[in-house]
Image (tube, rainbow, N blue to C red):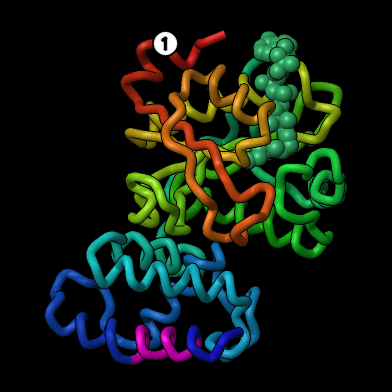
Amino acid sequence: MPEAERQLWRDLVERRLPDAARGRADWPVGLDHCFARILLDNACGGPWRDDIPPPAWANAPPDTLRMAIDLGEAVLTGRADLARLNRRSLVWRGKAKALPAPAALYDRDLLLRPWNPQDEAPFAALNADPEAMRYCPALRSPEASRGESRRYARLFAADGFGPWALEAEGQGFLGFVGGMRLMRVLPFPGGDQPGALVEIAYRLAPAGWGRGLATRAARLVLADLFERCPITEVVGFTALSNVPSQRVMQRLGMQRAADFAHPALAVGHPLRTHALYRIDAAAFRAGEGEAA
Ligand SMILES: CC(C)(COP(=O)(O)OP(=O)(O)OC[C@H]1O[C@@H](n2cnc3c(N)ncnc32)[C@H](O)[C@@H]1OP(=O)(O)O)[C@@H](O)C(=O)NCCC(=O)NCCS
């Protein structure tokens, strides 16, 4: 990891955030190790020591440290809600109450349910399938795949919603569909406020494609986010070349916004330019979510 980033991180959590906290009676914490815990847990999607051997400043993967730094800068400039970030971290550490979430969502042959250990093998197979992953920057190892499903499963307690495991009758586990708070700073309106916007995400095994399952599952998710949570707006994005994913968003009634360059992908990477879609609760309720 570049030394400059490490310095930036240490200066942020050891000096700039604790200094700023002295003038912020509304902040729930003020000590350097509390800021480090909150930012790293939110960048990792769980207690950071589960993913990174201490010390984090030396061992965190560059992308994780970058996310944590971006989160800290957003807290300093009032673009991120420190109380929310702190509560998520405490929930993951068993020190705050989990938010309620439904036991499952379903529609006829379609079931969105919590993740279970039996999903590990089929999810690893999906994440290692070059066809299913052709619009993702890289295939995932079984270990990375386990980490991903663990992160998704933890989001329900922290936020009251998250990416569900998807099952279709007679086929068992097919992938995931769900909403997640966008924690990475991204270059589009609202994308500079990590934790405020909710994104809809999905990944299905090819055995689940071509039957409208992803779209039906995503409608269940949007209805839950808008009616129960209540979330006011949902975004979705994917590589410009990922037409199947964009067709799902269009069927959901989501509106195309300006494309953006994904900061985690290098200039010139074929997947870097992303199409962005958005939908608000009013548009979903007005029936656009039922678009054919
Ligand atoms: C993105 C992805 C979920 C789309 O799956 P999909 O099966 O094409 O999408 P749907 O579930 O909405 O199915 C729609 C297709 O089923 C057909 N279909 C059949 N019955 C249908 C119904 N009742 N309603 C809607 N579509 C139906 C449609 O004709 C449509 O095919 P078309 O796009 O050729 O017109 C899937 O390609 C995928 O998981 N890809 C890999 C991961 C990925 O790219 N994720 C997004 C990355 S950001």
What secondary structure is marked by label 1?
loop
Q: Looking at the image, which residue is at 43% across and 84% down? A: 9
Please indicate, yes or no, whether residue 213 appears anywhere in the rendered image: no
The C terminus, quarter of image: top right
Q: Percent position (x, y) of residue 110? A: 69, 22
> Which of the 4 image quadrants contains residue 237?
top right
Q: Percent position (x, y) of residue 68? A: 46, 72
Please name the residue that numbered disc 1 is placed on. 287
Quadrant of ligand 1 in image? top right
Left or right position of 155 against 86:
right
- Compared to residue 124, the image places residue 291 above or below, namely above
- What type is the residue that disc 1 sits on? Gly
Q: Looking at the image, which residue is at 82% across and 44% down? A: 126
Q: How many residues crowd around disc 1 within 10 Å: few (fewer than 14), some, or many (20 or more)?
A: few
> Which of the 4 image quadrants contains residue 111?
top right
Q: Nearer the viewer, residue 240 or 186?
A: 240
The N terminus, quarter of image: bottom right
> Would the CB of label 1 be found within 8 Å of ligand 1?
no
- Point out the stretch of residues depicted in magenta: 6-14
Q: Nearer the viewer, residue 276 or 287?
A: 276
Q: Looking at the image, which residue is at 42% across and 85% down? A: 8
Left or right position of 185 against 204:
left
Q: Percent position (x, y) of residue 162? A: 54, 44
Q: Main secondary structure of the magenta part?
A: helix
Q: Percent position (x, y) of residue 78? A: 23, 64
> Which of the 4 image quadrants contains residue 10?
bottom left
